[in-house]
Image (cartoon, rainbow, N blue to C red):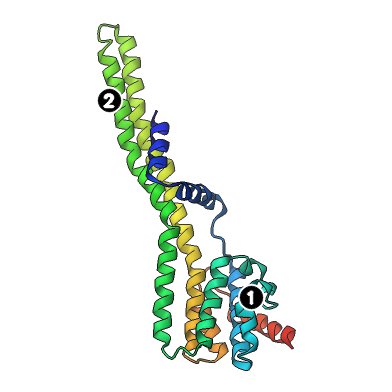
Amino acid sequence: MIGGAAVGAFLLSNDLAAVKHTVRDIGKVFKGPRWKSEDYRDLLCLLYELIRLARQDPIAIETHVESPLESSIFSRYPRIQADRESVELIADTMRSASMNYDDPHQVEEVLEKRMEANLHHAMHSSHALQTVADGLPALGIVAAVLGVIKTMGSIDQPPEILGKMIGGALVGTFLGVFLAYGLVGPFAAKVKAVIEEDSHFYQLIREVLVANLHNHSANNCIEVGRQNTPAHCRPDYSELEEAIKQVKKDAA
């Protein structure tokens, strides 16, 4: 009864898209963050290539920005190319730069609002699971009260029977609290942590491209991104330098 009531309340309070979103996000509890340290390194190399090309040949960059799925640069980084939000964020910002935006702070503000909206949407599954976790203890109490009511209807029974019925009623409270704090609540917290961890990937894109709008050198833009990478995913300076040298070699 507790599980059915919780699932029913979840389905009633969320539309079909939100339900599917939450079910997909539950898998993140076991998979962990999507973006690994090598993905951050590849992202910095990708951004370096794009910034370098945009400054050398502003016309040539338009091909990659307008058709990123067919771009030879993006295709070198298939995991990033497969992520729609990353590609759109890079392409839209590079397009803004080509339109001669003279106020980098304006672009930064637009990017900040966009990322906040995306993060708010991504967090819906965590909030939905947390709402279920908050309601489970109350559902457990309801189950316990129903058990007590049933017990009161059999008050003339021997103590051994009453004890069994009262114990069954208390199991409702136990299950409600256990499911809330031992299962659903931790799932909600883990989903939230994974989503926040993955959001650093998009924040790095913003930092590098905003630095580019301030006309810093390509190497300085990438170093800004490296410094803003989470510590456990941050590539070493020498490792990134070797990767960028390889990028230059391949481009040549």
Is 122 rendered above or below residue 225? Answer: above
| Secondary structure beneath label 1 | loop
Is 146 rendered above or below residue 38? Answer: above
Identify which residue, 56 or 237, lies in the foreground: 56
Q: Which amino acid, by three-letter code, is at mark 1?
A: Ser
**Rendered residue at 48%/88% (across/down):** 213
Is 162 rendered above or below residue 9? Answer: above
Residue 119 can be seen, yes or no = yes
Alpha-carbon span between mark 2 and mark 1: 62 Å
For disc 1, the marked residue is: 67
For disc 2, the marked residue is: 145
**Rendered residue at 63%/75% (across/down):** 67
Residue 231 can be seen, yes or no = no
Q: Where is residue 187 drawn, in percent x and y?
A: 45, 47
Q: Where is residue 174 drawn, in percent x and y?
A: 36, 31
Is 141 rendered above or below residue 165? Answer: below
Q: Residues within 10 Å of mark 1 (few under 14, many from 20)?
A: few
Q: Where is residue 55 drawn, in percent x and y?
A: 59, 92
Discs 2/1, front: 1
Q: Earlier in the sequence, mark 2 or mark 1?
A: 1
Hey, which quadrant is residue 38 in on the image? Answer: bottom right
| Secondary structure beneath label 2 | helix
Q: How many marks?
A: 2
Q: Where is residue 133 drawn, in percent x and y?
A: 37, 43
Locate the C terminus by quadrant. Answer: bottom right
Locate the N terminus by quadrant. Answer: top left
Numbered badge on residue 167: none
Q: Residues within 10 Å of mark 2 (few under 14, many from 20)?
A: some
Q: Which amino acid, by three-letter code, is at mark 2?
A: Val
Identify which residue, 182 or 217, lies in the foreground: 217
